[in-house]
Amino acid sequence: MSGTDVAVAQDDGRAARAFWSALVEPGDAVAGALVQACGAVASLGWVAHAVAAGRPDWSVLAGSTGHLDDALRRRVEVAVRRWAARWPSVDPARDLAVAARCGARLVVPGDDAWPAVLDDLGAVAPFALWVRGEDPRVRRSVALVGARACTTYGERVAVDLATDLARSGWVVVSGGAYGIDAAAHRGAVLVGGPTVVVLAGGVDRPYPAGNARLLEEVVRAGGTLVSEVPPGSTPTRGRFLQRNRLIAAMSRATVVVEAAWRSGAASTAHHAAGLLRPVGAVPGPVTSAASAGCHRLLRDGVAVCVTDASEVMELAGDVGRDAAPGHADAEVRALDGLEPAARQVHDGLSRRVARDTQQVAARAGTSAAEARAMLGLLELEGLAHRRGSGWVAGVGTEARSGEKKRRS
Amino acid sequence: MSGTDVAVAQDDGRAARAFWSALVEPGDAVAGALVQACGAVASLGWVAHAVAAGRPDWSVLAGSTGHLDDALRRRVEVAVRRWAARWPSVDPARDLAVAARCGARLVVPGDDAWPAVLDDLGAVAPFALWVRGEDPRVRRSVALVGARACTTYGERVAVDLATDLARSGWVVVSGGAYGIDAAAHRGAVLVGGPTVVVLAGGVDRPYPAGNARLLEEVVRAGGTLVSEVPPGSTPTRGRFLQRNRLIAAMSRATVVVEAAWRSGAASTAHHAAGLLRPVGAVPGPVTSAASAGCHRLLRDGVAVCVTDASEVMELAGDVGRDAAPGHADAEVRALDGLEPAARQVHDGLSRRVARDTQQVAARAGTSAAEARAMLGLLELEGLAHRRGSGWVAGVGTEARSGEKKRRS
């Protein structure tokens, strides 16, 4: 970049953050700590001086250096050498122009559009976000992540979860990859719900290329593409791994739908756990390698088992407000509401052979008085009927079973 | 029963326990507490007197009554009325004769064959076991339980787990029901392993009838049928529920393979948890109602997620000795063993385009010196190759990937 650009960046926090986002690799905690301590503008000016002079000179930072302890200064002095290697190729004016051409913009801390939840990342918070589409709405958001090589089972579950979450007003966050990520975005788009795609490369570079159309649909449906690296940046292995921390940080909870024993999705889950955000894992057949990573997260106690969108919302939501309802198709048996003694007496009945109270008591192991009392109760419930001088078992009244068919 | 039988039972602990096992329903904690406090013989004599006299008389127990507090006395006085209803039909001599005819025998506490682990049940421990086949060997035992209405997935998992457990010398305990129970017993029998069937009715009454042949095979293969109720007893709902506590108590851990949202298998799991024994649940597709109970146990924190026999043995076994090995088919990538800086430099390489050290450093976000050092490391690992004056990415040496193919 030219000297003029540096001068601009030193005066302008936005430009400085654009510069930082191009200068250092995502997750560079040394740069993050320096910017936290001295501000994006002043610290960039100091780096500019160190690069130009060929040696770091702390006196340039003047008043701000009080926040820098000796350990951090030493780490910064080492880091300046790696930043210097990339310095000549950084050009925020070019990056902003490329962004403008593809309909993207820069969002920095302090902007209304800045997701404040990212600040939980501390020194590894991104310097800025490059955004295409709507502002990243992340008040009630949940990450759905998983294997590229997913099964049809995992794909179906991801689409169903995303659809139900989007219908309930939740924003689905994922990484735009093949497999579970794509299914999650697609599920949200299907019902017109906003979804956030966190990319490892520039927002002008749909990756993978096969998902380019899906990413355009995300933007058209009111969703968002975000990246912490400038347009034009290529997605690299390191950026994929660091991208996972952004997915976790932008979401109130992270749910792994399918994942192999080792996987990027598991790394996202661990980032979420590190941020003390809830983590869920969808179980699958133990015979499926695509669920091995989910089962590992469950075994290790990193994740809670989630099986449907209501459980995901309970995980991600506010206590009480978002509690999952009882299992809708839970079986309710007519005998369940009865006291133990009544169930015991019912055991002493036959459906075919009538027995007198004494016989029922002997079979049930109760006293005759207790059997008599409980038979009266059972009769009211339609669970015992008189036949001659004895009793036979019933199956419960229709009214009763209808009335209690659903737990709530 | 005749007065002579009562007299015998009062002199003979075995006969007294046979009597108690017929007189009261399984899990009658009042009877259990009375027998614990006064002994099977003395307490039976006292009940005989109370039944004959039509009223309880504590003076009959003389010396032993010191262990009975007032609350228990009151509960016993109520219980005597229910025991009296069944009293005339109890006939241990007949029960022992029926047992002898079907090759069964009585096992009581103090016998070598008595599974001492049952004593953990306290007041609800069984008075005796009626046993067919080998002595119930339960030193290293694990319960595999689950739905009658299982899926082919659950059946396959149950057979595989039981087979692998039996091969490793573990005794599989289950309830002899259709579905998961039967699959578990069958898996053990398949490899000639002993398995214990805990029945809710008499050991002379194979239940369900469709499993009669399987139960005979269990006995022939060195396994065991046990019940706490005498031969001839019918299995009732209450006895099925109480039988579950015996399955849990006879096993070092209980694993639920498949279970509906509400199920007997879940009740066995809760019994095991109540005994502070480990509980495992096998996950399955969230789209399968047959796994809903397993997922509920995982969500509620009652069960640990288990996916194969080694994880079951780790759950049930001794710490260290039975630890599950690492996942056999875990994917290992050539880059995993590298330090972060080397991985970062590798990100700066292309497979097609050669780049010089300065370019690699700029792309990777490292200093030129660091890039140079890491490129040397990467070259040794086959992950970087010189081309002209620059570098291209490699995929790692064969030797390296072969050598680290398996975690251990």
Image (spheres, coloured by chain):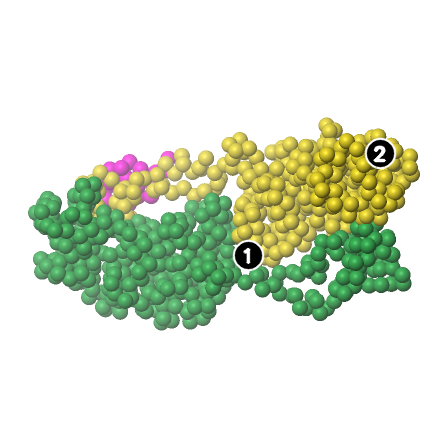
Chain colours: A green, B yellow
Q: Nearer the viewer, residue A74 or A98?
A: A74
Residue at image point 27% right, 37% down: B377
Q: Is residue A213 above or below residue B205?
A: below
Q: Amino acid at mark 2?
A: Ala
User: Which residues lie in the magenta part?
Assistant: B375-399
Q: Is residue A320 magenta?
A: no
Q: Secondary structure at mark 2?
A: helix
Q: Are marks 1 and 2 in contact (CB under 8 Å)?
A: no
Residue at image point 65% right, 66% down: A405
Q: Which residue is mark 2?
A: B9
Q: Amino acid at mark 1?
A: Val
* Image coordinates for residue B273, horizontal then vertical, percent: 59, 44
The quarter in which the C terminus of chain B is drawn is top left
- Dot 2: few (<14), some (14–19), or many (≥20) neighbours within 10 Å? many
Asked if residue A110 lies left or right of residue A213, the reply is left
The quarter in which the N terminus of chain B is drawn is top right
